[in-house]
Amino acid sequence: MLAVVNSLVLQGIEARTVEVEVDIHSGLPSFDIVGLASQSVREAKERVRSAIKNAGLKFPLERITVNLAPADIKKEGSHFDLPIAVGILAASGQLEGRVPGNLYLVGELSLEGSVRKVPGVLPMALELITQAPVPSLVVPQENLKEAALVQELRCFSVGSLAEFIEFVNGKGNLALVSNQGEVHGSEISDEHLDFADVKGQEIAKRALEIAAAGYHNIILIGPPGSGKTMLARRLPGILPDMNRSEILETTRVYSAAGLLDTDLPLITRRPFRSPHKNASSASVIGGGRVPRPGEISLAQNGVLFMDELPEFSRDVLEALRQPLEDRVVTVARAQATLTYPANFLLVGSMNPCPCGYYGDALRECRCTPHQISKYLARISGPLLDRTDLHVEVPRVKYEDLVPTERGESSSTIKERVVRAREIQKRRFEDRPYQVNALMPPRDIRRFCRLSEEGEKLLKAAFERLALSARAYDRILKVARTIADLEGESSILPRHLAEAVQYRSLDRKYWNGL
């Protein structure tokens, strides 16, 4: 007898529908799962066998063939347990009722028959609402809050295989997930990470404000202990709150990675990810034997902080170039090519040399010119060109540490950033982006026009600093953001001069390589 149960499979952070076809016929007892199933899917055989027996039902001692269609898509994960078990019971005639054709099932089974949490429920729910008519989804109880984020979908939670059987047989009901109301970004910032606690470093704080206002990538350069990490960790606190679309985008990535909290399955604050310098390319960029989102995707709509930037492997640094340009990362595999989002703000920090004191006024650098050159050369020209702001973070002076009054708070800075973002939102209302950093060349020529004085200033800087064409465009974008922070409709020479200042370190550190 043949039975068909609907389910879904993840491909990156997207989901596709899958038909679980179960055929049972006479022959020597066997249990085969076909349809490009991974090892994690094939292991379902033992879980399903025990779960059916412990639910008080009979596991058929016949030839069982399970096909996961379409067969050309790689199937990963343990969430096929529940639909396979239900398909076997339906094909063996042990269900009194019929599994509704508009019902999709996901869930991992324990050996005693309970249904356990699975990753990727949010992408699956978002996929189902694109179908017409919109079907219903059955999820484990631990995933019910996650499923409730999609208001357009009817979702049911199930605690065990026996509970679902009673529902199909008409002897019980599944709990209908009550959808959450409108989701908003968190307006509560971490009071322990406030810019008011940063002593001195006014230039660096100004640069981070510009980075937040225009979504510009930034590199902080300075000796150990100058406060680079302290500054970077406070950047998310001055970024605008996430809107509903950004919240669902970010939560979808964490759902696919299996990193959502069961009780609070919603990412409402902008992520701050800080991978270790020894992290592999797959963990930072994404991929692996079983492809999963990397740190750059987990930083979606937030901040990726790479401390000791030159210490990362060459593979990781060069692999950053494509995501920084395209805002997505593509992972190619034999069975499929997966695309993960990578719309993040990069903050890199580094010492000016291996010992950290090159150019320091108080401590002598112990590095040879060759060691300094080799260290700085780890950051390639193309990667430098993709970072808009290069900021020196010098040693903090004693006079800056003595005052007891607090500096400007993150909330005050955030107000200016939000006003600048509103200006950009109105400017780009008919475009697929809303920040200055993402302007293509055509829009740069339209929105970043300079006066004659500004043209002369930029030409002189272009020749003196030996800038590339990409650096030229990025200076104009930064100048546009500085003007937005001041509420100016035109880019004035002072805005351009400040933007050029954030590229002047290239001459000091890299142009001599």
Image (tube, rainbow, N blue to C red):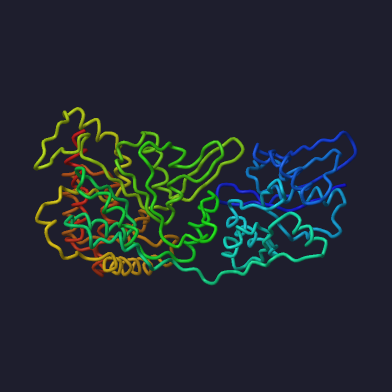
Give the camera-side residue of 352 and 24.
Answer: 24
Q: Position of residue 399 (x, y in %)?
A: 9, 56
Tell me if 507 is positioned left or right of 299 in this view: left
> In the rendered image of this protein, does residue 101 appear above or below residue 290?
below
Q: Where on the picture, by quarter, is residue 373?
A: top left
Q: Residue at x 21, y 51 (%)?
A: 502
Give the camera-side residue of 247 and 469.
Answer: 247
Q: Position of residue 288 (x, y in %)?
A: 52, 37
Tell me if 211 is positioned left or right of 393 in this view: right
Give the camera-side residue of 173 and 307.
Answer: 173
Q: Residue at x 28, y 45 (%)?
A: 349
Q: Position of residue 381 (x, y in %)?
A: 29, 39
**Seen from this angle, which residue lies furthest bottom?**
181
> In the rendered image of this protein, does residue 188 appear above or below residue 226?
below
Q: Position of residue 451 (x, y in %)?
A: 20, 62
Give the camera-side residue of 238 and 403.
Answer: 403
Tell me if 494 is positioned left or right of 316 in this view: left
Which image quarter holds the C terminus? top left
Tell me if 88 is positioned left or right of 265 in this view: right
Give the total of numbered labels: 0
**Seen from this angle, which residue lies furthest right?**
26
Q: Where on the picture, by quarter, is residue 337?
A: top right
